[in-house]
Amino acid sequence: MIERFLTNQVREKLGRGKIIVLYGPRRIGKTTMARQLLNESSEGAGLYLNCDELAVQELLESRNLKNMERSIGNATRIVIDEAQRVRNIGVSLKLLIDSRPDLDIIATGSSSFDLSNKIKEPLTGRSYEFILEPLSLSELQQHFHYSPLELSSAYERLLRFGGYPSVILGNDQEATEEISLITDRYLYKDTLELVELRQRQLLPRLLTALALQIGQEVSYHDLANNLGVKLETIERYITILESAFVVYRLPALLPNKRNQLSNRKRKVYFRDTGVRNALLDSFNPLSQRSDTEQLWENFCINERRKSLTKSNTPTKLQYWRGLYGEIDLIEQHRDESVNAIEFSWSNNKTVKPSKTFTQTYPEAKFTVINRHNLADWLKL
């Protein structure tokens, strides 16, 4: 089993009288991680509850503390899987942790939109929240110990098929089938549950449009016009896709700082490049693709986000778009230092920041990230 770095971060928060909430899409490894932590409890002290089961839903929705305590018995650590299935789950969790402060509770959810709305108020100050991402390059390197040549091959597979655990170990055909299945059966299903029935036909069209625009600035107005819906509908659906861990937004760093608060410019990236390719049914080798540079940019920003989370380094991530140029990624650190990064799979891109940017951030450090220096940049 490939060790997830988040496991240690979660483990460190156990035993503090607070609930662990583990978010992430289905098939990303939440249940595997939760069961691993459950098995670390003393013999007979662990309990697994699957909220896809009606009996479990009824037990937790009853909010009958005596019945819940009777079902838990002598367990000191419990996993409540897919907790968003339970109505008012936040109230039930509050009852349990108030009654049994010694109890370790790990609740998993495949929709932050659904679950966080149910637990936010009841569990204010009583929970730790984590997001499990697709496998990171760091986790894969730690497990497989890639040579430089193997690392280059790993890049190509990750760009094509992504980092879902069940996708990593298969051959190309198996990886194609698996990530297509995950996208069609799970991501669509979970996301569709969050949208209005009358608008469900919009979701695949919006996802396809976003998949074709990675690396580009996204205009909500253009999307609304092209898809024949209101601007507010596009904004709401992208928020839902974000909460279902399909995409995330990267805001623009504007030349005029006074306009930053009202900034509505953004790029939209996919948390997993394999999911993006599955939406387009496009798994060709990189040598046969016209979107390799865009995939590389999406992949590198994904890996940077994971790396910063692992090292617990608070960093503001944006991109720069001025009249005379664009920079793929801007990192603003707490010490006010600024890094400007361009991404190039083909190794032939040079950094030529605009005069406006260099005047605004004269101390900024410029870097081009390619196949040869990505590992060093991520500190693998």
Image (cartoon, rainbow, N blue to C red):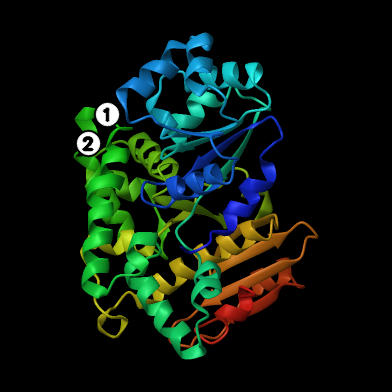
In this rendering, does residue 176 appear at all? yes
Q: How many marks?
A: 2
Q: Residue at x 51, y 83 (%)?
A: 370
Which quadrant is home to the C terminus?
Answer: bottom right
Q: Residue at x 60, y 58 (%)?
A: 317
Residue 93 spot, x, y in % from top left: 55, 22
Nearest the viewer among 91 and 273 is 91
Q: Residue at x 57, y 44 (%)?
A: 130
The residue that label 1 is drawn on is: 196
- SS at circle 2: loop
Q: Which residue type does callout 2 highlight?
A: Arg
Residue 30 spot, x, y in % from top left: 45, 47
**Looking at the image, residue 30 lies above or below residue 88:** below
- Check disc 1: other Cα within 10 Å, few if <14, some if 14-19, many if 20+: few
In this rendering, does residue 225 appear at all? no
Q: Residue at x 43, y 45 (%)?
A: 31
* Displayed quadrant of residue 134: bottom left
The residue that label 2 is drawn on is: 200
